[in-house]
Amino acid sequence: MHRLDRSRRRLAIALSALAGFVDASGFVANGGYFISFMSGNSTRMAVDLVTDMRRALVPAGLILGFVLGVALGTVVAARAGAVRKVAVLGMVGALLAIGALAQGTVLAQGALVLAMGALNATFQREGEGTLALTYVTGALVKAGQALGLAAQGQKMPGAGASLALWLGLVLGGVGGAAMGLHHPQAGLWLGAAWALAAMVAAFRIIRR
C-alpha cells in the first residue's frame, strides 16, 4: 500500500470503502452472510455444518462465487494490460448494476459476490503486487506491529496507509449498513455508480 503513489493510494482507499459498503448492505440483506468477507463466511459455514448442514450451502456458494470472481478479475486484468484497472472496475460496476436489477434473487447474490472477488484484481502486477481490497485484517496486523516497533523506538513504513485502508472499509460499511436497512435498492445502484466513478478516476491516473 505505501509503495503506491498518492493518487493510487486514494483510489485503493475508495475501493476498500466500496467493498465495506457492499459487504455491509449484503450482510443486512442476506441474514448475516457476507458478500466480500470470506473469512467470516468460512466460519459461518463451519458452524452451519455442525448445526444445520443445509444452511452451509449458502456460505459455501458465496465462497465459491468469490473465488470465481477473483479468477475472472485476474483474467480480465491480464488481458487488459495497461488499462487493467479501468477494465476490472468497469466489470465490477456492471456486476453491481446486475445485482441492483436482480435484487432479492440468487442472481443478485451471485453478481455481487463475483464483483467483490474481481475487485481484488484492481491493483495487480507491474510492480504493484496484489493489494487486497475486500479484507483488511493484514492492515490491523501491520498497525499492531507498528505499535510494537514504536515501543522499541523503531518505525514501520506504510502502517498509516494500511490503517487508512481499514478505516475506509469501516466507513464504507457504515454507509452500506444504513442504505441496506433504509434504502436497499438505491444502495446497490449507489455501489454500481461508485465503481464506475472509480473507473473514471483510474482512467485519469493512467493518462498522467
Image (cartoon, rainbow, N blue to C red):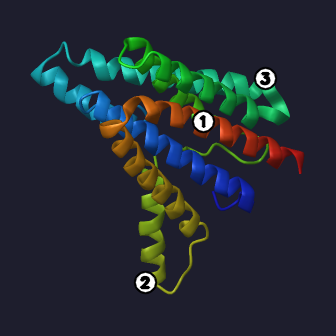
Label of residue 151 in the image? 2
Quadrant hosting residue 46: top left
Q: Position of residue 137 (x, y in %)?
A: 42, 51
Left or right of residue 159: residue 107 = left
Please name the amino acid that badge 2 sits on.
Ala
The disc, 1 or 3, on the residue closer to the chain's N-terminal end is: 3
Q: Position of residue 118 (x, y in %)?
A: 58, 29
Q: Position of residue 38 (x, y in %)?
A: 39, 34
Left or right of residue 69: residue 45 = left
- Given the current orientation, which residue lies at the most extreme left position? 51
Q: Are marks 3 and 2 in contact (CB under 8 Å)?
A: no
Numbered disc 1: secondary structure: helix
- Name above or below for residue 161 compared with residue 179: below
Residue at figure coordinates x 38%, y 22% from the top left: 62
Label of residue 193 in the image? 1
**Label 1, label 2: how far apart the Cα atoms are:** 43 Å
Numbered disc 2: secondary structure: helix
Left or right of residue 173: residue 162 = right
Please name the amino acid that badge 1 sits on.
Ala
User: 86 or 67: which is nearer to us?
Assistant: 86
Label of residue 79 in the image? 3
